[in-house]
């Protein structure tokens, strides 16, 4: 039975989260190269059974890019890169190789809006010439559009088919302009909603939903404090009554979202109900800069050569705070099937030792090295919850599509871990996929400092190894009380697709 199998989950989920470590933001600017190419920087990846009423037969996939957008960032704002390839990959047989890839390509077209000034026609400097309310609005001086291709098999050599609009069959979709402000777009929510499409996915008999556009960043975190060597009193972050004591530093930031809501049967394979997912971005190998660019839009650079992956994100926060600095770019360019090369960052994680330094609490890191419990849980999924039958060890976000979704109000903010502790019935949350409400930060803090071994006990009850026991946890029960003082559960979200909230506007 699922419930008996889930006796493993306090540990297993913690193990999975411990790999994310004391992570206080998802993958925002997580590797040296990606800081130079923010348009292809993936910040968060979500994958969950849709919990909107009447949509429980679907899986929602959300890939966020371009983190830390300031709403006032005009006059060009945050268009996607037409020279990049953005992808969402699905592994539906557990072999660590993509079986389905949704590929997004963007195009930004200048309308050349001009005004007559004296006896001259002069192009305007802004991306809008007036109020915007409709799809492909004539007042937009730059029109953003995109296309989506489904690749079955290898993402570069597999069979490709085009995703089309269920209304009319078009293969090009308009993307809403970013939330410039209330004078330009008086009702941004209504404007953005016009860009939610019903789409036909090749080989899928039921229509899916799709949205691409700016959203409010759904991640909550005490960002500056954490990266300033956890500049917070221990008395605060170990007191459960102070969850939500400080403001969310990402509350006024936006991201760009690629969202799909796909029928479950179009993602799964045979009787296997578990799918793995991750998102990547790739750029062309070569780039030439023209010292004398021609008039037009984005004419300075010319790109060519093979696609080269520069961003990768499955489980939250792995590259940001688990992978060593010298291997961060390598991880972003890697594939799940090759993850054995990064195993030492899991078996011998540095984060507990860094927390000792940051909080001036020597000898508080768990001592059960090597952390083979983390390797098993993180790279395979959890038996009885989200482990594929024929799994190959690899880092992916894994979701058991057979587990029913839970309405938003009843979701446990600590995912499966919190649900088990509360004796509830919510098995649809992190690490079984990831929902926007799941507070992966707080669970991670508990796990990295020993919550895993506190649960395993002295009898290896959860089969994570005899060395993983309470005596290996210097913090003892305190390890179960850690949090970052920011509450993920109060982040504003929508009740249905695309779930993430209307973006913050340049003016209000």
Image (tube, rainbow, N blue to C red):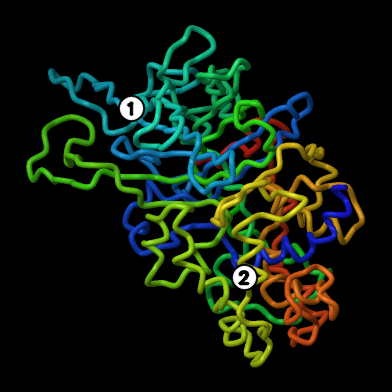
- Element class at badge 1: strand
- Element class at badge 2: loop
Vertical relation: 94 (above or below) 54: below
Apparent side of residue 155 relative to residue 200 in the rendered image (left or right): left
Q: Residue furthest bottom?
A: 362
- Give whichever of discs 1 and 2 has the lower sequence position: 2
Apparent side of residue 408 relative to residue 496 in the rendered image (left or right): right
Distance (Cα) linking label 1 and label 2: 41 Å
Residue at numbered disc 1: 142
Across and down, in percent, residue 388 comes to: 66, 47
Across and down, in percent, residue 448 comes to: 67, 73
Q: Quadrant of residue 156?
A: top left
Vertical relation: 293 (above or below) 162: below
Across and down, in percent, residue 457 comes to: 84, 77
Crowding around mark 1 (Cα neighbors within 10 Å: few <14, some 14 to 19, many 20+) is many
Where, quadrant-wise, is the C terminus in this rendering? top right
Residue 508 appears in the figure: no
In the drawing, what numbered circle is on residue 22? 2
């Amino acid at each position: 039975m699922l419930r008996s199998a889930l006796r493993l989950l306090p540990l297993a989920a913690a193990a999975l989260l411990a790999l994310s470590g004391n992570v206080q933001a998802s993958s925002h600017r997580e590797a040296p190269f990606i800081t130079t190419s923010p348009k292809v920087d993936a910040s968060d990846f979500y994958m969950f059974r849709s919990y909107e009423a009447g949509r429980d037969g679907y899986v929602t996939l959300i890939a966020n890019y371009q983190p830390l957008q300031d709403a006032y960032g005009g006059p060009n704002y945050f268009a996607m890169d037409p020279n990049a390839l953005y992808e969402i990959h699905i592994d539906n047989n557990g072999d660590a190789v993509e079986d389905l890839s949704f590929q997004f390509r963007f195009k930004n077209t200048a309308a050349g809006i001009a005004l007559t000034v004296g006896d001259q026609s002069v192009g305007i400097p802004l991306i809008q010439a007036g109020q915007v309310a409709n799809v492909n609005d004539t007042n937009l001086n730059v029109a953003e559009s995109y296309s989506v291709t489904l690749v079955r098999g290898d993402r570069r050599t597999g069979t490709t088919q085009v995703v089309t609009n269920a209304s009319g069959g078009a293969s090009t979709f308009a993307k809403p302009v970013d939330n410039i402000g209330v004078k330009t777009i008086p009702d941004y929510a209504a404007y953005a909603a016009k860009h939610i499409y019903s789409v036909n996915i090749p080989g899928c008999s039921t229509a899916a939903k799709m949205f691409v556009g700016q959203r409010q960043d759904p991640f909550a975190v005490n960002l500056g404090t954490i990266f300033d060597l956890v500049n917070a009193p221990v008395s605060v972050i170990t007191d459960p009554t102070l969850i939500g004591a400080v403001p969310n530093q990402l509350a006024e930031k936006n991201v760009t979202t690629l969202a799909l809501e796909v029928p479950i049967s179009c993602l799964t394979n045979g009787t296997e109900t578990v799918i793995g997912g991750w998102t990547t971005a790739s750029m062309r190998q070569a780039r030439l800069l023209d010292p004398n660019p021609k008039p037009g839009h984005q004419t300075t650079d010319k790109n060519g050569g093979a696609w080269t992956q520069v961003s990768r994100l499955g489980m939250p926060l792995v590259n940001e705070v688990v992978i060593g600095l010298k291997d961060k770019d390598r991880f972003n360019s890697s594939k799940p099937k090759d993850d054995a090369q990064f195993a030492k960052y899991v078996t011998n994680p540095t984060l507990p030792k860094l927390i000792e330094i940051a909080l001036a609490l020597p000898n508080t890191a768990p001592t059960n090295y090597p952390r083979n419990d983390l390797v098993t849980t993180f790279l395979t999924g959890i038996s009885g919850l989200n482990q594929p039958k024929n799994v190959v060890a690899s880092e992916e976000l894994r979701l058991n599509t057979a587990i029913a979704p839970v309405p938003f109000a009843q979701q446990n903010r600590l995912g499966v871990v919190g649900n088990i502790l509360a004796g509830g019935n919510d098995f649809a949350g992190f690490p079984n996929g990831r929902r926007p409400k799941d507070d992966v930060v707080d669970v991670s803090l508990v796990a990295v400092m020993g919550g895993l071994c506190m649960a395993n006990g002295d009898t290896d009850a959860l089969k994570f190894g005899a060395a993983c026991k309470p005596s290996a946890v210097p913090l003892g029960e305190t390890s179960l009380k850690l949090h970052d003082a920011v509450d993920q559960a109060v982040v504003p979200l929508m009740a249905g697709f695309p779930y993430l909230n209307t973006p913050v506007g340049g003016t209000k």
